Image (cartoon, rainbow, N blue to C red):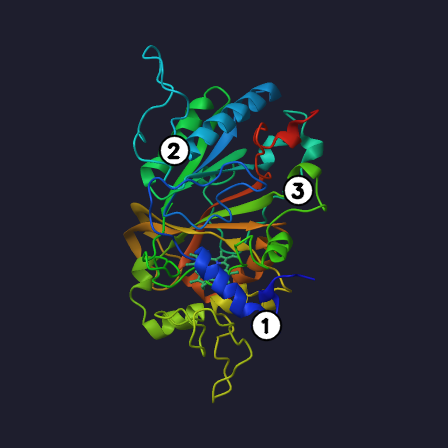
Amino acid sequence: MSRCPFASRRAFLGAAAGLVAAARTAGAAGTVPVSPSAVEPFHGEHQGGILTPIQRHTYFAAFDLTTAKLSDVVSMLKAWTQASARLTAGETAAPLSDRNGPAADGGAALGLGASRLTLTFGFGAGLFSKDGKDRYGLSSRRPEALVELPVFHGDQLVEGRTGGDLSVQACADDPQVAFHAVRELVRLAYGVADLRWTQSGFISAPDSGGTPRNLMGFKDGTRNPPATPQNDGRACLDDVVWAGNEGPAWMRGGTYLVARRIRISLEHWDRTEVDFQEQVFGRHKMSGAPLGGRDEFEAPNLSAMDEEGNPVIPEDAHIRLGAAETNGGAQILRRAYSYNDGVSFIAERWPPWRQGMQYDAGLFFLAYQRDPRTGFIQIYANMAMLDALNQFTTHVGSGLFACPPGVREGEFIGQKLFDAA
Ligand code: HEM
């Protein structure tokens, strides 16, 4: 039985007032005012960048491991741990002392401050076995939850934007700080791991608060499990986000990240009427309130009918298909960023079947969950076939990563996986 208040409308009504207040003050759904010197902790029970109030920029990197030796992987993770502790504190990746030889830090973020940098690490299936080979003797430690994602209806995944043996996500309020941090980790990976794909992203909301809007102009992140450990949402996060006793001990307190690069046909969207757009999402564009409601944070009434006997929130509306109520209580923690990668020649797969140079822009969808089989897969399998939003979106990249628990002082990233391996 989920302890998340969104699992049922009645439970939501009971818990809503306190949780909504807590979510707003913590900025869980919104960005927080930029302060270059602000620091997010690196060490802790859980990794940063998951519950952390969302930073304005991300730089995500997936790596292929190229070494045959486990000891190389461990050495790299130790080096990444040391560098990450320094970078997230606003320092250089290593002390700058020697002017001979390659610099200990490239210097691109000197003077910029920590800008709330977080670095979140994940392990892909390829760390455990690749091409049928148990490269590092870790295959017996692969969590069952680290499945291969099924091929979903409409997927157009590009090999070069999919998969990876390791992932690193930098989030910061400054784009240069985020990029620099990953670049320094890439330097430490030379000879052990190569970049496979990367994705940058951005998101902004007014400093006065509020949920950020995505590139479709809708508030995105409203109905997310509560993201503040201090309130009674903690039990909910244990149910929805953090891995428990059901899997290997090394993943306890960790989580699973599903990343999807979703291109949005903005040209097509921009030709539609606001009324129609609201039917697609099931929410009002300006206020973010569910159709039939007035307040952004009120629970959608999924059973309400209009005078003609039609559902107020259409059967194929995005929020109906995504709601816990429609999915046997399944929930995920979404922490998505918009992306904008210029223009490409694109042939749309829906009417009006435009083709030509179009924005290569959309949503870098990132969702954390205790188990992807009962999280993203359960929710999206249905959505992929029925969601009205699909007319405007195409999934072109994908990854699933097991993100180990937080790093304690003196430990290295994912240490328990490697102990006695
Ligand atoms: C370009 C792609 C997408 C866009 C623009 C988008 C946008 C939105 C917006 C505007 C909302 C309503 C506000 C909110 O509660 O945050 C929402 C809700 C939601 N979305 Fe998406 N979304 C996208 C893809 C996905 C995908 C692939 C999933 C897969 C699981 C998903 C799952 C959800 C869920 C679970 C909710 C909350 C539903 C509820 O309980 O009301 N979204 N999304």
Q: Quadrant of residue 207?
A: bottom left
Near-viewer residue (363 or 82):
82
Residue 123: % across, % down: 57, 36
Within 10 Å of disc 2 (Cα), the crowding (few <14, some 14-19, many 20+) is many
* Residue 158 at least partly seen: yes
Within 10 Å of disc 3 (Cα), the crowding (few <14, some 14-19, many 20+) is some
Q: Quadrant of residue 73?
A: top right
Q: Which residue is mark 2?
A: 90
* Residue 133 at least partly seen: no
Q: Earlier in the sequence, mark 2 or mark 3?
A: 2
Per the model, the C-alpha gap separating discs 2 and 3 is: 29 Å
Near-viewer residue (254 or 356):
254
The residue at the point 47 percent across, 88 percent down is 308
Q: Quadrant of residue 27?
A: bottom left
The residue at the point 59 percent across, 49 percent down is 150
Residue 39: % across, % down: 42, 40
Can you say which quadrant of the picture contains the C terminus?
top right
The residue at the point 52 percent across, 54 percent down is 228
Near-viewer residue (366 or 380):
366
Which amino acid lies under the numbered mark 2 shown in the image of this protein? Answer: Gly
